[in-house]
Amino acid sequence: MMTAPKPSYSCACFYTDNIFIQEFHVHVRYTGEQQFRRDYERVLSSQGCRTSEQFRNVLETIKKEVERRRKLGEESLHRRREISLHYKPLYPEVYVLQILLNELGFVDALTAPLCEKYIEPLTSLLFPDWGGGCLDSHRAFVVKYALQEDLDLSCHYDNAEVTLNVSLGKEFTDGNLYFSDMKEVPVNERTYAEVEHITGQGILHRGQHVHGALPISSGERWNLILWMRASDVRNKCCPMCDNEPVLVKTLGDGDGFTSVREDREQTVDICTLT
């Protein structure tokens, strides 16, 4: 018997919080222009945003980012439909080696078995208090660093309980990762440690571990990122806003939240290491 797919959810903070203004190196929250001016006009001024034109550009950037986030699910479903209708693999037997993440079946063919068979036994032991033993969804994507493109990644934390970061190659120099404390530690109290990221090796860490990537100085670097989620953990506290999540039903894959009512009807509430 076929069952309808479970609805996907994001926390409402996804559409308002943690918006990064690259030019001034600041994360902001946006619910409207009046709120934004009240909370960030002085902060941005201290970072070099001092003219009315600069401020208008920042507002425009933020509004575009909010709109982009709101359309993510719809656009992802559209791409999946187009790919399903028009893409025919030349060599079906090697199709799973040439796919583009979830929109081409990457999750079912590769990353889901990888998580279930190999990663979760490790996360159960390493992160038992942070959902390591009950990971039930994930998001997989690839990040590219290259000259004249994105060279680095600013300090941040992930929308995940556990993250796997695998260096795929190609040839590059520099571009190490750096790690600090957990996000709860105040910025002025954090310490940092640099970690060499070697091609073919992965780094497994808590999603709330503050980290970033230093600039590469030559070549290209590609990384496979797995954000692994545990609904049992994030349903109680959203890792991005640190509040009980306000669920917003979304198209596409959502962010690993589930409805409590639906969970009680369809699943057994268990998150233990056996």
Image (tube, rainbow, N blue to C red):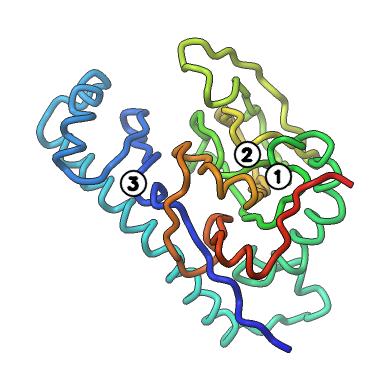
Q: Would you say the residues marked 1 and 2 are in contact, meaning their CB atoms lie under 8 Å apart? A: yes
- Which residue occupies 19% across, 22% down? 42
Point out which mark residue 170 bears.
Answer: 1
Which residue is nearer to you in this view: 170 or 184?
A: 184
Residue 26 lies in quadrant = top left
Q: Would you say the residues marked 2 and 3 are in contact, meaning their CB atoms lie under 8 Å apart? A: no
Q: Point out the frontmost of discs 3 and 1.
A: 3
Among numbered discs 2 and 3, the one appearing first in the sequence: 3
- Which residue occupies 50% across, 61% down? 9
Q: Does residue 90 lie above or below 39 as drawn?
A: below
Q: Which structural element holds mark 2?
A: strand
Q: CA distance from mark 1 to mark 2?
A: 7 Å
Task: Inspect the image, locate mark 1, and give the three-letter code of the amino acid beneath it.
Answer: Lys
Q: Does residue 196 lie above or below 36 as drawn?
A: above
Residue 232: percent from left, percent from top: 65, 50
- Which residue occupies 54% across, 34% down? 157
Question: Is disc 3 surrounded by few (<14), some (14 to 19) or many (20+) residues within 10 Å?
Answer: some
Residue that badge 3 annotates: 16
Residue 171: percent from left, percent from top: 71, 40
